[in-house]
Image (cartoon, rainbow, N blue to C red):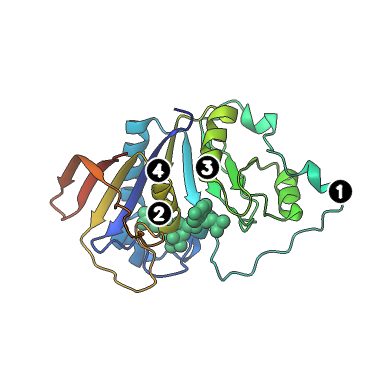
Amino acid sequence: MDRPYVVLGVSSSLDGRISLGPNRTLMDIDERDDVLGNRDEWEEFYSSLQKKHDIDVFMEGSNMLVKETEELRELERYQGNEDELYHDFLPHEVVDRPGRTGWLAVVDGRGRVRGGYTGEEDKPMLHLVSRRVPPEYLHFLRKSNIPYLIAGEKRVDLALALEKMVDKLGAKAVLTSSGGRLSGALLKKGLLDEIHIRFNPVIIGGFDTPSLFASPDIEEGEWPTQLEFIEGEVTDTGHIFVRYRVKR
Ligand SMILES: NC(=O)c1ccc[n+]([C@@H]2O[C@H](COP(=O)([O-])OP(=O)(O)OC[C@H]3O[C@@H](n4cnc5c(N)ncnc54)[C@H](OP(=O)(O)O)[C@@H]3O)[C@@H](O)[C@H]2O)c1
């Protein structure tokens, strides 16, 4: 296989909502979000998936970090040769850092994640960007020593980004807890291998609340994605854990 094994791990209400409402980022999380799992439960869910699949890349969508409506931070104007920026940036001191065990990757096709977070000592940040991002943004990442891979023209070409992760970084398995749009895109493109969902005994509703998989409606004659059940468990607290393999 020329791409890593890709696993989705997500916590959902019984009605498939993965957030309490639209446009909520990590910054908006409050105690009500515990209906989808508190911090300890998340850590337990995640570390079980990490161990099961020997995960080395944790991948998120940009909407988890930046609201669609958010005004973006102005970046310093770049006056150098732009062509030099539109190449993958994988600084040796980050890639080969002693103790590095993986990556925290964010899909950021428009260059909106501008906080400058460099990740954890053992898992640095890796931005996955398209050629559409402005040079100022790439310059900013370089100055902040944040690695990036370029894949795609207007959006991140997810298949290519995953292939580059293998070729350039030796990635083996990706765990994404992506929001619904990224999960929907990965699923539609045949890039998801396994799906783990923790269903919580709660219904959230909402017409615009992010749901498990958001992608264009299936077309006339197109088949829904078929899944193969692997395992499941119902707990005393009424949570349902399910694991499926995506059929090809
Ligand atoms: N309960 C849970 O387990 C859980 C887990 C994660 C997130 N969440 C919640 O989910 C919400 C975010 O979900 P969301 O659906 O709004 O956003 P999202 O899944 O974060 O999707 C947005 C990201 O996916 C990229 N993307 C979407 N379609 C694409 C395509 N066809 N090709 C390439 N890239 C594509 C976007 O790229 P561009 O940058 O180019 O637009 C953007 O980076 C947040 O509220 C978050 O808290 C919940």
Q: Are marks 2 and 1 in contact (CB under 8 Å)?
A: no
- Quarter of the picture containing the N terminus is top left
In percent of the image, x 73 and y 50: which residue is there?
140
Q: Which residue matches tag 4?
A: 190
- Most extreme residue toward the bottom is 207
Circle 2 is placed at which residue position? 184
The percent coordinates of residue 233 (x first, y second) are 16, 45
What residue sits right under mark 3 in the picture? 104
| Whether the residue under disc 2 has CB within 8 Å of ligand 1 | yes
Q: Which residue is mark 1?
A: 80
SS under mark 4: loop
Q: Percent x, y for residue 154?
A: 62, 54
Which is more N-terminal, label 3 or label 1?
A: 1
Instruction: Indicate which disc, 4 or 1, sits on the residue closer to the N terminus.
Output: 1
Q: Residue at x 47, y 41 (%)?
A: 58
Q: Which sits earlier in the primary sequence, circle 2 or circle 3?
A: 3
On the rendered image, what quadrant is the C terminus found in?
Answer: top left
Between disc 2 and disc 4, the foreground one is: 4
Compared to residue 224, the image places residue 56 above or below, namely: above
